[in-house]
Image: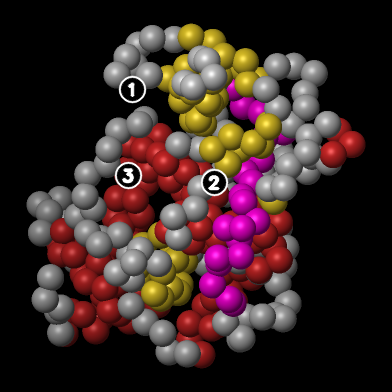
Amino acid sequence: MQKWNTIFSEEKGLISNYVILENVADERGEPAAKVARTLVRLGCDLYLRFGPSREPYIGENYFPEHPTVEMKYKIDPGDYTLTKESQEVVIKRLGRGDFTTLGLLVWIYTKVDSSITVPYQIELTKKDESICVVVNPDDVAKLPPLPKSIEGASVQRGGPSAKNNFQISEENYHKNKKSNPELHKIFWRAFVHLRDKDEFPVEPQYKQVWETVYNELRAEELMRDKKTIPRKRKHDPHDHIEVIDPVYVPAPKLQWIISGSDSRISDQGTYSLSSLPPLLSKLKKNPPKI
C-alpha cells in the first residue's frame, strides 16, 4: 500500500506550492506524526491533496447538526484543509503506521454568489491510495531547528517503519539526561488502578501497566474516529503522551511532549518499555503524590 507521500507533478496536471508531509519528516529525520503534531501545535493546518484521477473522488456532505443527512459530493483535484478533528485523527494514524484516509473530513468552500461563500465538511467514504497529506512551506519554516546532536545523523528513511527515528530521540534523551517526571505519575496511576482492582490477586506486572496506559490512548483515538469528544484521560490527565506502542511490537516506546504556555512544545522525548520495570521498583519504595 502506498503511503502519504504520493507525488503529483505539474506534468500530471496539479500545480501546488504545498509540500508533502512525509518528505519534510524525512529531511528532518523525524517521524511524520511528530512533525504533524508540532505544526498543529504551532497553529498550522494539515491538508489532503487530491491529484488528477480517471475516477472522480466521491465524498459525502457532513452536517454536524444533521448527522443522518447524506449527500454525495464530487471532489475536484486540489489541496483541501482537513478539519481540526481529522487533523488529530491523521496524527494518531501516522503514529501507528496507518495511512488510510477513510472517514477523514475536509473543508470545501462553494461560492453561492459573488459575495457569499459557503463552507462544507466533506467526508471521504472510500479508501484511496493516491491521496497524500501536504503542508504549507511557510508553516514548515516555523518548525523549530533540530538539536545539533540530531543534525547530520544517519537516519533510516521510510516513515513509521524506520526504527531509527525513535532510536535517535532515545539516544539524545539519554545523552542530555532529559526526563519527564509526569511519566512517573502516569505509570503509577495505572499501577494503582490495576492493583486496586478485585480481579488482580497479585501485583500487576510492568507490561500490564504499560498496556493500561496504551489502552486509554487507544480508546481516545477510537472516540475521535467516531467524531465523539473523548473523555479526559485518567492516567495522563495533562496529555503528555503523544504516541505509544502496544507491548507486542518490537522494542515498544512512547513519545512524550510538554507544551509551553503559548501551546508550543517546550520539551519532548521518548521512553521505552524496557525502562519501566526499574521505574516501578523505585516508585513502590517512594510513591509519588498523584
Q: CA distance from mark 2 to mark 3?
A: 21 Å
Image coordinates for residue 157, horizontal then vertical, percent = 72, 63
Residue 145 among those drawn in magenta: yes
Q: Main secondary structure of the magenta part?
A: loop
Left or right: 48 with respect to 263? Answer: right
Left or right: 141 with respect to 176? Answer: right
**Range of the magenta residues?**
126-146
Please name the residue shown 67% across and 59% down the image. Answer: 24
Screen quadrant of the C terminus? bottom left
Nearer to the camera, 80 or 160: 80
Q: Secondary structure at mark 2?
A: loop
Q: Which residue is mark 1?
A: 64
Please name the residue shown 53% across and 55% down the image. Answer: 36
Sequence-earlier tag: 1 or 3: 1
Q: Which residue is mark 3?
A: 220
The mark closer to the camera, 1 or 3, is 1
Number of the label disc, if any, that sits on residue 46: 2
Screen quadrant of the N terminus? top right
Image coloring type: secondary structure
